[in-house]
Image (tube, grey):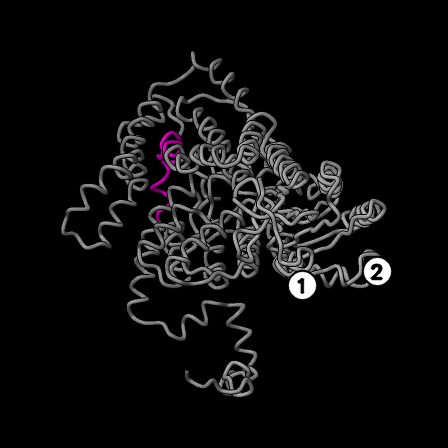
Amino acid sequence: MTSQPPPSKLPFTEPYKPHPTRPRFNWKLTRFFPLLGLLKHYRAEDLSGDLLAGIIVAIMLVPQSMGYALLAGLPPQAGLYASIIPLVIYGLLGSSRYLAVGPVAMVSLLVASGVGGLVASDSPDYWTLALTLSCMTALILVALGMVRAGFLVNFLSHPLLSGFTTAAAIIIGVSQFKHVLGVSLPQSEAVLETLVNLVEQLPKAQITPLILSVVAVSILLFFKQVLPKWLKSSALPPAIKNTLQRSGPLVVVFLGAMVTWAWRLDQTLHLKIVGVVPSGLPPITLPSFDPNVWSALFPSALTIAAVGYMESIAVARSMASKRRQTVNANQELLALGLANLGTAFTGGYPVTGGLSRSVVNFEAGARTGLASVFTALLILLTVIFLTPLFYYLPNAVLAAIILVAVTNLLDFGTLRTTWAYGKEEGITWVATFVAVLSVGIENGILVGVATALGAYLWRTSRPHVAVVGRVGESEHFRNVLRHNVSLVPGVVAVRVDESLYFPNAQFLEQVISTLVADDPSVNQVVLICSAVNYIDTSALHSLEVLVDNLRVSGIQFCLTEVKGPVMDRLRGTHFMEKLGESCIYLSTHVAMQKFSGNQATPSA
């Protein structure tokens, strides 16, 4: 046996000392600007990866951002403006190397819902309110980051988010049919109302935008599903393959604009087109600071902040885990918040991290946040020099891009999985899905949160409680209904598999009282607390009542396997004075040895 050094000599007992050549200020600066820390070890191959990823993401983002802006009820240039400054800010501040920030379908829908409920989409105040929504979202995210409260969004469970995104995808898809059919519809979140309006407008539908949409969707599906299979066996470099696979939106934008221009479809067939897209640098804009406006937009801003951050952090962590990297959740709050603050003053609207673009960014070889900076520079060049090319772009083509993009949001598979695993989580999915479709987005999320919390309270209010016995001659104690165990006469050992708090305090008391009433020979009750992480005052009071009632009946009550943090809270309480330290045992085995005198009887 090799000898071990004394504890005082172990290397990890030495106090941490900052490196003498690294000033403390610079250390903090690299924490706030993660990109600066990465650039210290930047290599030539990193530059090529970032540049290629930036080009490919820009190819995707230009048509997508214009389409998402129309979905938000804004002119297409708003989507382009929202894809410049925010990307630079996030590239400098974000802790994720691969997250691609910009306009996304979900947030665009939330903007249309929040702002559209206050003013009409053709109102001159509409864009100002969208800027205000960006500013409010930014302040919420930054505030959460400053107080390190990113954990709050964990209250949005996975089934809730899945049900929400699936319903939102349906709302987005239905909202684009007006562009596909070339008809005008009033703004509405209610799917049934929109469908009714569509049916009423069918006699006015135009065949030209429908044909363009069908052709555009077919081309996009070809690039998405067929082309990758063809390229898989080709000898082309991976970079070329990635670029070709992701260029579908750009191809349909080019073809749609060329066909419209060649046959003057906007004049001969009255096809609705994007029209003039202003060129030049993004403008300096100001949000509204009217308290009434802020009060009206606050629910939408809170929803965008929560949903946007959840989507971003989930994508960022997924990408980072594939390269054994980490993501700082609170730094992400600050980065996303300041990115939204940047877009509020440069003519954009709220942004967040997008799943599809982030995956492309990752697969294209991005190494650092410089990939986002390169994407922003390419979009800036597009805004300055290439916007005249978008004049003849049909709205129907942008609608086709959105329709194909939101198919990734449909997630009925999660419903099947959660329903099979746990009905209460499946109910949360269904409740959120139905509520979002029927009563709107913000109210639908509130219904989902209430359903999820209600399901949690119901589940924990009736925790699993098991009577246990010894397995063979071991020190393990298991459920008498599942294992062949031995019991100690006169002793009932109960394990509760949940923390004790007000919803389940009375339940545990009733279970133990029933067990005692059913067996007159019981003179000792052992409560095993191995799964108890917390005991609140209501549960503590219930335990005090239980101790008193059992003592009147001549029954002793004791606790075993109490965790340290729980024991720390119990010490000094009236309950401990009543129970006594001698009635708390380190393990169930020690307690049962004392009570049985090493004798046990087999269970039935």
Which of 75 and 308 lies nearest the eye of the viewer? 308
Which of 33 and 341 lies nearest the eye of the viewer? 33
The residue beneath circle 2 is: 577
* Residue 355 x %, y %: 42, 46
Which of 457 and 20 lies nearest the eye of the viewer? 457
Residue 42 colored in magenta in the image: no
Of pointers 2 and 1, the one earlier in the residue sequence: 1
Q: For the N terminus, give its image quadrant.
A: bottom left
Prevailing SS of the magenta stretch: helix
The residue beneath circle 1 is: 564
Given the image, on which type of amino acid does mark 1 rest?
Gly
Image position of 402 (left or right of 477): left
Which of 424 and 516 lies nearest the eye of the viewer? 516
Q: Residue at coordinates 83% horizontally, 44% vertically from top-left?
A: 553
Name above or below for residue 258 compared with residue 148.
Answer: above
Magenta stretch?
386-401
